[in-house]
């Protein structure tokens, strides 16, 4: 099972994501914003990063950009949790180095399907 | 896979959404006051965005729909396609109110949208130029399917750098049908020398054939993250042999894409009201510092404990000194631990103060007044219970100050004052108390109106001359209100007497100083905590009474010549140029065996809101901290008693309610 | 484009069933052991290692330990082979590895990598 970093400033969303993934047997680390995620990522390499876009302190786009400068994170899949109204955010995320996205709102089944899709 | 019960996240969602709305409101008010930091707009946008995302995720469709429109409007502001003006801020503040109400109804499981929210939503929709497109339903799978697809896929060099991998794509395609690689090539752009290769750049291309009746949309979905990362051409297979058709039956494929498929069941989601209610028992956020302090304290306590048990094990007289030291240390540890534990319940008053910018703004508009609000000491901490209950009295005082205290710009100009009035809220420590002051530079209490009203109510005689302090005291009388016309702000039948009662219920006191034409200052003194008081233990007959230290002015033994008996049985004594009524505690509470001879007992002078009374007790036994137990909860409310506590010898002692005792004393001396 | 679909050469067949890597033998065949994780993060080191052994002789890649691989790794090996052959060397494989086989097969790169035809064992 994979080691996953879940980044979202919303405690309820983060809780839902972490709970669902743990239920599927994954090991989940939670972070409240991009900066804290970077701190967590510095300590160990995750198999997958799931990150909200809009966050205080450091948003998801800046976080992806920073992660991709680290050798250890060159090929690690990073998915943005984004909303349908922000197509340009998807593109901005991609330009920063995001692998793909999961459109909010999503339910636990959609989350698991997408994670499975990325992790193979 | 087990389905996840989303209702477990509802409480968190409501809490963070309400916090988000608070932040949104504060940022809107900051914008309104002329601040222009872009971070303000980001904060507002982020709050709306999070609420929308959460609401949609957790099944609060009405909240999500409402926030969606508000967010569209905010997006226009964020991208500077729309300017910020007062009208927009009004509208968004209204939206904040509306969302608070909607969340409250969601929480209670009631219908969420109402006339107000629908009207506001319609207005927001009109502003953003028509209904924002709802999320497009996932493209319906292509009905017309084919025997297979030819896919030409050439990676652009940066494809791998986004964490995408053709291996993963091919695996996904394989789930759709049999995948055949017709050709794999290294593109010409590939470096000739290994030395020049950046392994994270991709120089591969493929010609693929996907056999089977696969929907085009399913293939598109596999490549949906790769827009701009590859060259892609997908065409139906031109010449398919029947054999290929037979060889590749379409595989049943699990839906792979997390497209926002519209939910089939839009019915109201059941909310477990009972679970939500019981979960509401109240949590508290504690900073890590406070918890660390507690753990440190615990550590020291453990050391002391082991030291004492060590002494106890091989005890002889020679160790008496060490034992004494150990006990002193234990006392210090216990006190520090108690303080740390109490501090956990302490929260900054900012959470209450933060309501006021919005309230003041609304009142300014409503009353046509100009007010500058100053907040000081927001970080002052108060017990959580006190904090929760002090909000309403403060709101009332702020309303009063703006409604009755501050004048209109015209009046102010005429009085030679700046048109904008100042309202100042301040919190600070003073002794063992927290003091909250609400001051304004308005007209001050209306001496004439208050006197007239008091005469009308029969509180004073028409010819009575009152000084400022006496006038101020009148406004706290039950049922007293001078509002010339019952405005919808202050004239709701809630008078200053209710404010005073609320403050007193918290163990606090309230007073007012006012100067005609200069303004008024309301001062509320609150205890740091409701749970523990510093008290003076007194003996009355067989009983022990605890008098809160904070109310004690002095204790003294009276000489016979200091006491005067007055007609009707009352007694007063001379104290610092005044005569104070004497309250015999044994008489008030019917204690047997008490000292009845005033000269042999001790009189404790108590003060409450400027009024003093002498309390007669037998003797003073010492100071002690008392953990207050509610008498009401265990027995019933008793006039003059605020609670009970258990003394170190296990006996129960009652705690004197100074306010109540002073009132009793006053009534007696007035009746006399 | 490409034109790299060269005729299959028998190459330097590894000694069948050799369980442990042989030391560099007399006729300058060198054995390079691929690490367990060959994915992107490890490829800078792998590339340096491969560059060092570029020589006219035979190179045998030991894949016994290989556990994780990605497209970039196969591409690196592919370009290594291309340059190796240009310099007159040959690429051979030591050991059968399911992960490598599955990835190369899915991407259609078995021939370009000179992987021996899958033994139907």
Image (cartoon, coloured by chain):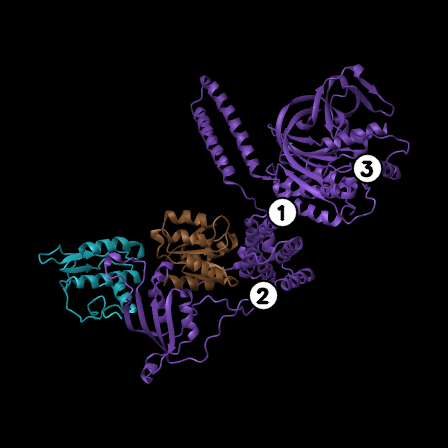
Chain colours: A brown, B purple, C cyan
**Element assignment for label 3:** loop
Q: Residue at x 15, y 66 (%)?
A: C11
| Dots 1 and 2 on the same chain | yes
Residue with the mark numbered 2: B132
Are there few (<14), some (14-19), or many (20+) residues within 10 Å of tag 2? some
Q: Chain of mark 2?
A: B
Chain at tag 3: B
Q: List the residue tagged with mark 1.
A: B34
Mark 2 or mark 3: whose residue is earlier in sequence: 2
Question: Picture coordinates of residue A92 (x, y %)?
Answer: 45, 59
Pointer 2 with pointer 3, Cβ within 8 A: no
- Mark 2 lies on a secondary structure that is loop
Q: Residue at x 50, y 37 (%)?
A: B289
Q: State which chain disc 1 sits on.
A: B
Q: CA distance from mark 2 to mark 3?
A: 54 Å
**Which numbered disc covers residue B446?**
3
Image quarter where the N terminus of chain B lies is bottom left
The residue most toward the left is C26
Of the numbered discs 1 and 2, the one sitting upstream in the chain is: 1
Can you give x and y, in whole percent of width and height, for residue B435 in the image?
66, 34
Q: Is residue A49 above or below residue C7?
A: above
Separation of residues labelled 1 and 3 (CA atoms): 35 Å
**Nearest to viewer (mark 1 / mark 2):** 1
Badge 1 marks a residue whose secondary structure is loop
């Amino acid at each position: 099972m994979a080691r996953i970093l879940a980044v979202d400033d919303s405690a309820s969303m983060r809780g839902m994501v972490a709970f669902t993934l743990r239920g599927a047997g994954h090991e989940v680390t939670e972070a409240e914003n991009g900066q804290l995620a970077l701190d967590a990522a510095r300590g160990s390499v995750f198999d997958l990063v799931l990150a909200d876009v809009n966050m205080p302190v450091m948003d998801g786009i800046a976080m992806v950009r920073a992660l991709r400068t680290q050798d250890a994170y060159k090929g690690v899949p990073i998915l943005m949790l984004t909303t349908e109204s922000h197509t340009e955010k998807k593109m901005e995320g991609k330009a920063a180095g995001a692998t793909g996205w999961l459109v909010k709102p999503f339910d636990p089944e959609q989350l698991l399907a997408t994670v499975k899709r990325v992790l193979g | 896979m087990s389905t996840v019960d989303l209702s477990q996240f509802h409480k968190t969602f409501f809490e963070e959404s309400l916090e988000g709305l608070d932040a949104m409101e504060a940022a809107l008010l900051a914008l309104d006051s002329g601040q222009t930091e872009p971070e303000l707009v980001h904060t507002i946008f982020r709050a709306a965005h999070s609420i929308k995302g959460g609401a949609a995720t957790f099944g609060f469709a009405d909240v999500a729909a409402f926030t969606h429109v508000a967010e569209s409007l905010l997006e226009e502001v964020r991208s500077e396609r729309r300017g910020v003006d007062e009208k927009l801020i009004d509208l968004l503040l209204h939206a904040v109110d509306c969302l608070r109400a909607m969340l409250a109804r969601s929480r209670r499981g009631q219908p969420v949208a109402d006339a107000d929210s629908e009207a506001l939503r319609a207005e927001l929709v009109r502003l953003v130029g028509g209904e924002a497109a709802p999320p497009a339903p996932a493209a319906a799978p292509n009905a017309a399917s084919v025997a297979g697809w030819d896919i030409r896929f050439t990676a652009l060099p940066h494809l791998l750098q986004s964490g995408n991998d053709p291996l993963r794509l091919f695996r996904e395609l394989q789930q759709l049908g049999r995948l055949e690689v017709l050709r794999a090539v290294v593109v010409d752009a590939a470096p000739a020398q290994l030395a020049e290769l950046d392994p994270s750049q991709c120089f591969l291309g493929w010609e693929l054939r996907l056999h089977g009746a696969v929907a085009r949309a399913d293939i598109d979905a596999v490549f949906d993250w790769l827009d701009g990362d590859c060259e892609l051409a997908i065409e139906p297979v031109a010449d398919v042999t029947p054999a290929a058709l037979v060889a590749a039956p379409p595989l049943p494929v699990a839906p792979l894409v997390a497209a926002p498929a519209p939910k089939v069941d839009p019915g109201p989601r059941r909310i477990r009201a009972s679970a939500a209610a019981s979960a509401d028992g109240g949590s508290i956020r504690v900073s890590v510092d406070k918890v660390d302090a507690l753990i440190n304290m615990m550590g020291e306590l453990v050391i002391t404990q082991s030291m004492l048990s060590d002494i106890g094990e091989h005890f002889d007289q020679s160790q008496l000194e060490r034992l004494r030291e150990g006990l002193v240390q234990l006392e210090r540890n216990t006190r520090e631990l108690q303080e740390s534990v109490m501090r956990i319940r302490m929260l900054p008053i900012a959470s209450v103060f933060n309501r006021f910018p919005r309230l003041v703004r609304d009142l300014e508009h409503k009353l046509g007044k100009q007010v500058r609000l100053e907040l000081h000491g927001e970080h002052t901490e108060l017990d959580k219970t006190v904090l929760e209950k002090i909000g309403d009295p403060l709101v009332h005082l702020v309303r009063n100050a703006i409604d009755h205290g501050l004048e209109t710009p015209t009046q102010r100009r005429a009085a030679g004052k700046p048109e904008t009035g100042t309202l100042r809220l301040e919190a600070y420590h003073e002794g063992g108390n927290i003091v909250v002051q609400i001051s304004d530079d308005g007209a001050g209490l209306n001496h004439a109106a208050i006197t007239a009203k008091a005469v009308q109510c029969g509180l004073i005689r028409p010819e009575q001359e009152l000084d400022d302090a006496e006038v101020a005291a009148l406004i706290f009388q039950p049922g007293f209100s001078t509002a010339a016309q019952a405005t919808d702000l202050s004239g709701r039948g809630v008078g200053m007497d209710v404010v005073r009662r609320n403050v007193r219920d918290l163990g606090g006191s309230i007073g007012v100083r006012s100067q005609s034409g200069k303004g008024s200052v309301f001062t509320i003194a609150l205890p740091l905590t409701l749970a523990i008081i510093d008290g003076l233990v007194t003996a009355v007959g067989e009983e022990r009474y605890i008098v809160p230290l904070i109310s004690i002015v002095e204790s003294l033994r009276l000489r016979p010549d200091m006491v005067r008996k007055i007609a009707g049985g009352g007694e007063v004594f001379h104290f610092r140029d005044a005569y104070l009524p004497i309250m015999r505690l044994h008489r008030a509470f019917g204690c047997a065996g008490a000292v009845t001879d005033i000269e042999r007992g001790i009189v404790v002078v108590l003060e409450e809101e400027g009024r003093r009374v002498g309390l007669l007790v037998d003797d003073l036994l010492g100071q002690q901290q008392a953990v207050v137990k509610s008498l009401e909860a265990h027995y019933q409310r008793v006039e003059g008693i605020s609670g009970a506590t258990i003394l170190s010898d296990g006996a129960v002692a009652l705690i004197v309610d100074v306010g109540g005792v002073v009132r009793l004393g006053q009534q007696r001396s007035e009746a006399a | 484009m490409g034109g790299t679909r060269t005729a299959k050469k028998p190459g330097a067949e590894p000694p069948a069933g050799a369980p442990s890597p042989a030391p560099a033998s007399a006729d300058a065949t060198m054995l390079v052991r691929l690490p367990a994780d060959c994915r992107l993060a490890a490829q800078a080191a792998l590339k340096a290692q491969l560059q060092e052994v570029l020589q006219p002789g035979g190179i045998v890649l030991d894949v016994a330990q290989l556990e994780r691989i990605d497209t970039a790794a196969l591409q690196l090996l592919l370009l290594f082979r291309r340059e190796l052959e240009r310099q007159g060397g040959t690429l051979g494989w030591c050991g059968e590895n399911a992960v490598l086989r599955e990835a190369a097969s899915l991407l259609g790169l078995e021939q370009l990598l000179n992987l021996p035809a899958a033994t139907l064992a």
